[in-house]
Image (spheres, rainbow, N blue to C red):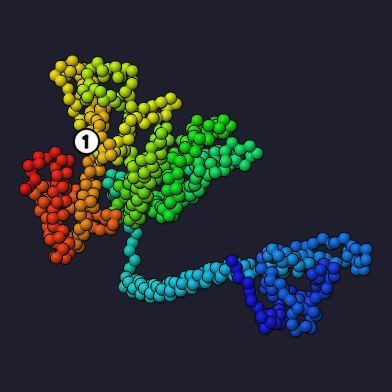
Amino acid sequence: MQKGIRLNDGHVASLGLLARKDGTRKGYLSKRSSDNTKWQTKWFALLQNLLFYFESDSSSRPSGLYLLEGCVCDRAPSPKPALSAKEPLEKQHYFTVNFSHENQKALELRTEDAKDCDEWVAAIAHASYRTLATEHEALMQKYLHLLQIVETEKTVAKQLRRQIEDGEIEIERLKAEIASLLKDNERIQSTQTATPSDEDSDIKKIKKVQSFLRGWLCRRKWKTIIQDYIRSPHADSMRRRNQVVFSMLEAEAEYVQQLHILVNNFLRPLRMAASSKKPPITHDDVSSIFLNSETIMFLHQIFYQGLKARISSWPTLVLADLFDILLPMLNIYQEFVRNHQYSLQILAHCKQNRDFDKLLKHYEAKPDCEERTLETFLTYPMFQIPRYILTLHELLAHTPHEHVERNSLDYAKSKLEELSRIMHDEVSETENIRKNLAIERMIIEGCEILLDTSQTFVRQGSLIQVPMSEKGKITRGRLGSLSLKKEGERQCFLFSKHLIICTRGSGGKLHLTKNGVISLIDCTLLEDAESTEDDAKGANQDIDHLDFKIGVEPKDSPPFTVILVASSRQEKAAWTSDISQCVDNIRCNGLMMNAFEENSKVTVPQMIKSDASLYCDDVDIRFSKTMNSCKVLQIRYASVGRLLERLTDLRFLGNDFLNTFLHSYRVFTTAIVVLDKLITIYRKPISAVPA
């Protein structure tokens, strides 16, 4: 809350004297009294944003003051004359000062002169500290600009004086050289006793032929030089570089035209339609669909004009400074790309409105659109950054290493590639979250695990689930009946941590089956289901070995087995490969972490982290932070002997030697558990574990 201003009598008296002396406006005005019955004539003085009033122009102390900061001053009409009024109202001119404070009454003033009234209104309207500060800032900027101009002019004048002095020295030298040449010429002419006679006509002909031959040889040599350069790799590289630049200009012109159509044929008409009485679309939806589209158009119009200006100075083509201007503004593309999928969803939702769909089809039918939809125009900016990267790759491929803008183009390419990677990561993460949410909305019962942002979508497809009564064996006849009746068809969704199995109901909605949410950490993949020789002989090659089993052993429920059948060998291989990869990732990433958190509280010393001998070919050890912020080991791959050697190292057992014996048994037990789990994962015989 803004605090009040404290003024004592000394301050007010001092400011009042200053206003009487240096006030911007002074004079007598009539002021309406507080009870709105009488008009009192006071002598007013305006100082900056303070309005003082005195009893007369000879008073030394002000009777009061008004703070005019943020007030509004306007002319006011003359009030209706009262029956008892003695003063003629037509000779009075009124104006009011309205203050920004809610509880402060407006100040009503009047004067007998219209010009004086207008001058008072103008003076009070401009009596604002904010206005003075703005004018002061503008004047300071002009002053700094003029100082820069003066310094530049001084530098230029100094250079010109230096050039003039150098020119004068050169003129004196040339004069001395001419004088010496004239003296030599006079001396030579004086030594000649007789002037030569007219040359013979044959000698003149010989000289003419020699001159012709010299000219022909020079022209031939110059032609050879030009042809050699035209055939040189440098000239070919420059031609290709110019061709890339001209192609870039054409592509930029086409892109600017596409943005122009997007803004003028869709964005602005829809923005006007959103302001109508019955809007087919809201302003928020328009902003969501066309986020930063207009800004991108303005940016590329400037870039295109600069590119045309560079082309006009051909064959000297310098483009690096254009990209230096473009690079700081490309962060608006991040917002556009991040919003792209959401904008298409909003557009699809708005199309369900018949009025909007009809209006959009009318816009798309315009000749400028060339039968292209709004979705097509919204997709064009998505490919602009990769197009710039490809163009810069081609430019650098045909730009010599000693070229003046080689480093600048390389820097621009690296920045664009970095921006492209950031945009790709953001789009991938956003698309994964939206994909998970879309699948979660399709499931009628809902699925809370899909609300986890770390859940990464891997694949989806239709598989046939065999009932548990089959006991893992599938005959040719049973498989055919399942395919025909579709009684076992399931919609399967594989994520990084879970496998979801659903049935498709009416309207495209999904229903979770019994045990339809399977945690992959509890799964064991059995790719080759058991089959007899008779089944193998009687089965068709197209449907044989298409099934695979998933054994599930949950902690809080009895184990069960899920048997799934793919439509082809390729699909089975893809599903089993992805499931196996997800299971291995979960176990390898969480195995050591869970084991140490549950069975040990050992803190790894810093000396282990700095030991280079721990990082070798057959042991890969990494350090990661647990939930309690202690350092533990995460083993990616290791041989059994090397793993046991590293896990029994005394340095892993604590910094204090006295505590080593107390922790050694617990840590060694943990190491044996970890080895047993690793051997189970990688299907190694248990006999390989040292006793």
In the figure, residue 383 lies in which quadrant? top left
Q: What's under tag 1, amino acid-wise?
A: Thr
Q: Is residue 565 above or below residue 224?
A: above
Locate residue 324 relative to residue 621 in the image: left or right: right
Is 633 on the left or on the right of 288, as rendered? left
- Residue at image position (13%, 49%) is 672
- Pick the front one: 584 or 189: 584
The image shows residue 271 at horizontal and vertical percentages of 58, 42
**Label 1 neighbour load within 10 Å: few <14, some 14-19, many 20+:** some
Q: Nearer the viewer, residue 447 or 198?
A: 447
The one nearer the camera, 11 or 507, is 507
Instruction: Name the quadrant containing residue 404.
Output: bottom left
Q: Is residue 355 left or right of residue 501?
A: right
Residue 605 locus on image (x, y percent): 19, 62
Residue drawn at the location 43% of the way across and 35% of the way down = 441
Secondary structure of the residue carrying tag 1 is strand
At x 30% / y 19%, what residue is drawn?
483
606 vs 166: above or below = above
The structure residue drawn at horizontal position 88% and vertical position 65%, both measured from the top left corner, is 89
User: Which residue bears the numbered disc 1?
Assistant: 524
Quadrant for the N terminus in the image: bottom right
Residue 319 visible, this orientation:
yes
Quarter residue 279 falls in:
top right
In the image, 273 versus 608, the foreground residue is 608
How many numbered badges does the structure rendering display? 1
Image coords of residue 423 (percent x, y) = 38, 47
